Amino acid sequence: MVEIRLTRNLFLRCMNIIYLFAFASLYIQIPGLYGRNGVLPAHVQLESKDNTLVQNIHNKPTLLWLAPYIGLDTEYMMDALSLIGILLSFSGFVSQKFCTKPMFAASWSLYYSLYQVGQTFLWFQWDILLLEAGFLCVLVSPIRHKPGTRRRPTLQAPSDPVTFWLVRWLAFRLLFSSGIVKLTSGCPQWWSLNALNVHFESMCLPAPLAWYCFHLPGWFLNLNTVFANVCEIFLPPLFFFPVQSVKTVAFWIQMFLQVCIVISGNFNFFNFLTMSLCLSLVNDSFFATKKQDNKSSKLGTILSYLTCLAVYGTVLYATYVLYSIKFYPDGKIESKIAFSKAEFDFALSKGLPIVILVGLLSFIGTAFQALLAALSQTSSSFFSKIFTLLSTAFYIVAAIFVFADSLVPFSTLHPSGRTVAFP
């Protein structure tokens, strides 16, 4: 089984950093946004005199309902929840000991409680993405920290690749959907590849570099729009490619795209969260490559690299054809979309069910390997082996429910997606 323990731990530490950014930035803004004299006072969302505490929590699940019971008003209770969230996330960032299920469950509950009264200011894409990724962290993280030594290092559980696969599935859905909706919206700016000409001028919080990006040649901005489309439409299905080198290259390309977005504009923690999710594309060998002595290992590496070249060579050729790339002697590169909206809709109608099935096959393969690892695991007792097998089965079932539930919104990209997404 592929080792992902170190990669998973890095992902959990990164998620704590994201939580820290989210709670800290919200804490500073609470008085002006949600105080009694704020833009959208939060206490208005919690005015319910006739209902009981249980009824209130059922109607709007938030810990803020407990404020009157501990002598705080809504604003100060929001401050308290944010400060607790800052403490928990900072603890998880500085020490792996705190990257456990109880800690992530607490962080998710705190942010969800604040989200319930956040209204317009917490309805951004990154807030919803943080809640979904934070929920997955509860599944991905261990119940408790098990320190290891050099002689007896901590081993990953057989179920770890299954839960970590859900993070990769989320990264795929996020990026693939982002690319598809740009074209399905019918926006003339995206179809003419002029979107970046408008983007750098109209973004809410541009970085200083955005001014220089805006004044780049039009053909170069169009080419960058092509690059963004390829990164978000063509590359995400490769997240499930069975050859690791293909996924590693996809990881680096996505990192480059997100860094370019970060240095040109401020989108809160959205891009950092996206980069954290993309860690699911690599494994522990990415951080600590072992020496390969036998010829079979070297041959496998060569075949892996050749496969990677073939895959990305195909992607480059498809980009050259579909975006009608033309090179000129003066260095100018012209690009324009060579397919119609009807052709794109037809391709999406055929391709969306296929990528869903590819994701399903990838999950089945990961779950099957996890069960084999649980059955073949050598343990000190029979009951320990039974517990490991039951635990693995539990996480597989939980992952099935999460995967099936995620198909409902994902299949709305095109009506054809409903042929494989069951209610």
Image (spheres, helix red, strand yellow):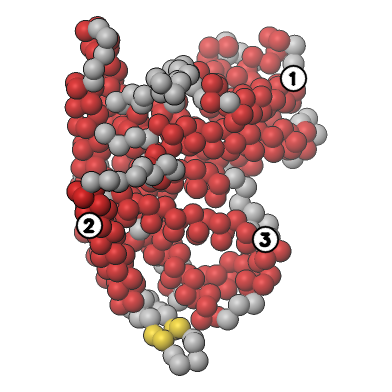
Closer to us: 269 or 33: 269
Separation (CA) of disc 3 from disc 2: 44 Å
Pointer 1: what residue?
73
Pointers 2 and 1 in contact (C-beta within 8 Å): no
Labels 3 and 2: the sequence-earlier one: 3
Q: Which mark is residue 303?
A: 2
Identify the residue shown where x is 45% and y is 83%: 333
Neighbours of disc 2 within 10 Å: few (<14), some (14-19), many (20+): few
Question: Would you call the spot at circle 1 few (<14 residues within 10 Å), some (14-19), or many (20 or more)?
Answer: some
Which quadrant of the structure image shows residue 199? Answer: bottom right
- Does residue 253 sit above or below 374 in this rendering? below
Residues under labels 3 and 1: Cα distance?
36 Å
Residue 276 placement, left or right of 351? right
Residue 146 or residue 78, whichever sits in front: 146
- Residue at 55% across / 80% down in the picture? 218
- Which quadrant of the structure image shows residue 1? top left
User: Residue 385, located in which quarter of the rendered image?
Assistant: top left
State the image coordinates of residue 27 (x, y, percent, origin top left).
72, 32
- Amino acid at the residue labelled 3: Pro
Image side of residue 402 versus residue 45, left or right: left
Name above or below for residue 375 compared with residue 199. above
- Name which residue type carries label 2: Leu
Residue 206's tag is: 3
